[in-house]
Image (spheres, rainbow, N blue to C red):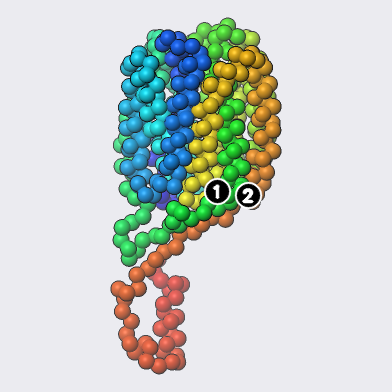
């Protein structure tokens, strides 16, 4: 990917497509439960299977984007997403719904992997991430306003994800076919796949913490629709409107994070933001009316993408090749995958308010290691990165033998003429 300052819109588009399925999780799980002969726990299990498939793709492809090429992988992921979610949308046979959801999740994970790898190679990963979060928040908000008016049925949110994947296929034309040119005379040598990951301890701590962070977030997100419908006594239209407003507030949060940039570093937004999210989760889980439900959801969704953008930027700073960005993102997807099932089980055993307290306490605990990793970075600067080594073929420029037939001024002059500082850029 180019390091120019122009906006990498293909990466932003892929980010939007890859994250759309998790953003639509509440309505997807709720409609699976309402439109098919499934219990709430069974519907949550299908949502978990979808996201687990997405996480698996990320773990498998983290170091292989260069090998297969971003363009080919992106197209494969978009086609898998379209085929999988489309199949799940247009059938009522439970095994086919499960299979389609898992194939679609595999596509979403592939798309996200390509986007994360490309974003990590940008000069300003945080800026590109915020643009991607703006895109997915705006699209998901519009769908939350639209889907309730399309009638009942489990297929509407799944169809929306499939259509989005198809519409973004043309954007892959602007991705490189391969990260490594085939011309050996002027290729950029990137570190081999077997090269050890830099900052291994910090990356592992961040990945483990991010798994738990996403688990807590999506345990609530996966049952938020049921909290609004059953505990707060709202209609589906009202709950959809609350989610749309909440995602709109998330847009404002992302815009604010983009404007703030790295002025406060990463530790303060990640640490303080996660602590505030814990309070929002407890409030939303205990909601019994429209005011408390809307307040908790809107405040939570305002903060969530802000913290997420800084965490993704932090992961990208650990490795310029994007491996930690993909692995941390996949760990996040793994936590997201367990979220719907964990939320269903916790709410069934402890009730929605009890679930909120448990999740809030867990978030407060993982705030410490996440903040510690963020403190390892310099204020507003990434950790040291790997730099590509350029191999230049010298045999194409034969040197006259007279340059070597004696020592003295002529030899020194010839050597000075070959210094990098004199090369034409």
Foreground residue among 26 and 381: 26
In the rendered image, residue 105, in percent from the top left (x then y), is placed at 41, 29
Q: Are marks 2 and 1 in contact (CB under 8 Å)?
A: yes
Residue 353, image quadrant: top right
Residue 82 vs residue 207: left or right?
left
Residue 375 visible from this viewpoint: yes
- The residue most toward the front is 95
- Given residues 310 and 371, the one toward you in this image is 371
Q: Decide: is 66 above or below 415.
A: above
The disc label shown at residue 331, or none: none
In terms of secondary structure, where does tag 1 sit?
Answer: helix
Task: Classify the position of the C terminus by image quarter.
Answer: bottom left
Q: Which residue is mark 1?
A: 317
Q: Is residue 6 visible?
A: no
The local crowd at label 1, few if under 14, some if 14 to 19, many if 20 or more residues have their Cα within 10 Å, is many
- The image position of residue 263, as x and y in percent, is 63, 44
Relative to 153, say whether 189 is above or below: below
Horizontal side of 10 relative to 321 (left or right) equals left
Give the x, y percent position of residue 355.
64, 19
Q: What residue is shown at x 65% (from left), y 33% (from top)? A: 273
Closer to the chain start, of discs 2 and 1, is 1
Instruction: Please report the residue visible at 34 percent of the width from the left and 70 percent of the height from the top.
Output: 393
Q: Cα distance, mark 2 to mark 1? A: 8 Å
What element does badge 2 sit on? loop
Give the residue at mark 2.
377
- Above or below: residue 127 compared with residue 297: below
* Residue shown at 58% from the left, 51% from the top: 199
Q: Is residue 277 left or right of residue 251?
A: right
**Dot 2: few (<14), some (14–19), or many (≥20) neighbours within 10 Å?**
some
């Amino acid at each position: 990917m180019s390091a120019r300052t122009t906006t990498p819109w293909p990466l932003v588009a892929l980010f939007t497509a890859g994250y759309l399925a998790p953003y639509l999780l509440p309505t997807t799980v709720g409609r699976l439960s309402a439109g098919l002969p499934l219990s709430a726990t069974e519907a949550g299990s299908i949502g978990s299977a979808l996201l687990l498939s997405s996480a698996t793709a990320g773990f498998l492809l983290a170091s292989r984007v260069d090998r297969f090429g971003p363009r080919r992988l992106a197209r494969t992921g978009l086609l898998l997403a379209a085929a999988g979610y489309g199949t799940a949308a247009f059938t009522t046979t439970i095994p086919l719904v499960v299979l389609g959801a898992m194939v679609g999740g595999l596509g979403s994970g592939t798309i996200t992997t390509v986007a994360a790898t490309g974003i990590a190679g940008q000069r300003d990963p945080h800026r590109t991430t915020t643009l991607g979060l703006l895109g997915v928040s705006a699209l998901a908000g519009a769908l939350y306003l639209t889907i309730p008016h399309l009638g009942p049925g489990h297929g509407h949110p799944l169809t929306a994800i499939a259509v989005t994947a198809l519409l973004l296929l043309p954007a892959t034309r602007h991705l490189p076919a391969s990260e490594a040119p085939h011309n050996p005379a002027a290729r950029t040598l990137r570190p081999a796949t077997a090269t050890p990951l830099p900052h291994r301890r910090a990356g592992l701590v961040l990945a483990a913490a991010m798994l738990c962070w996403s688990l807590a977030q999506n345990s609530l997100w996966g049952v938020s629709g049921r909290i609004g419908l059953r505990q707060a006594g709202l209609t589906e239209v009202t709950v959809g409107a609350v989610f749309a407003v909440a995602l709109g507030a998330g847009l404002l949060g992302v815009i604010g994070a983009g404007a703030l940039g790295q002025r406060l570093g990463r530790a303060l937004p990640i640490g303080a933001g996660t602590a505030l999210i814990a309070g929002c989760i407890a409030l939303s889980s205990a909601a019994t009316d429209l005011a408390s439900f809307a307040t908790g959801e809107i405040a939570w969704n305002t903060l969530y993408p802000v913290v997420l953008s800084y965490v993704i930027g932090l992961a990208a700073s650990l490795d310029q090749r994007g491996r930690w960005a993909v692995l941390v993102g996949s760990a996040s997807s793994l936590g997201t995958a367990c979220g719907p099932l964990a939320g269903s089980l916790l709410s069934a055993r402890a009730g929605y308010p009890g679930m909120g307290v448990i999740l809030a306490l867990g978030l407060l605990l993982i705030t410490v290691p996440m903040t510690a990793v963020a403190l390892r970075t310099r204020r507003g600067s990434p950790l040291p990165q790997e730099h590509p080594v350029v191999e230049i073929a010298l045999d194409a420029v034969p040197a006259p033998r007279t340059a070597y037939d004696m020592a003295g001024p002529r030899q020194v002059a010839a050597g000075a003429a070959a210094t990098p500082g004199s090369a034409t850029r």
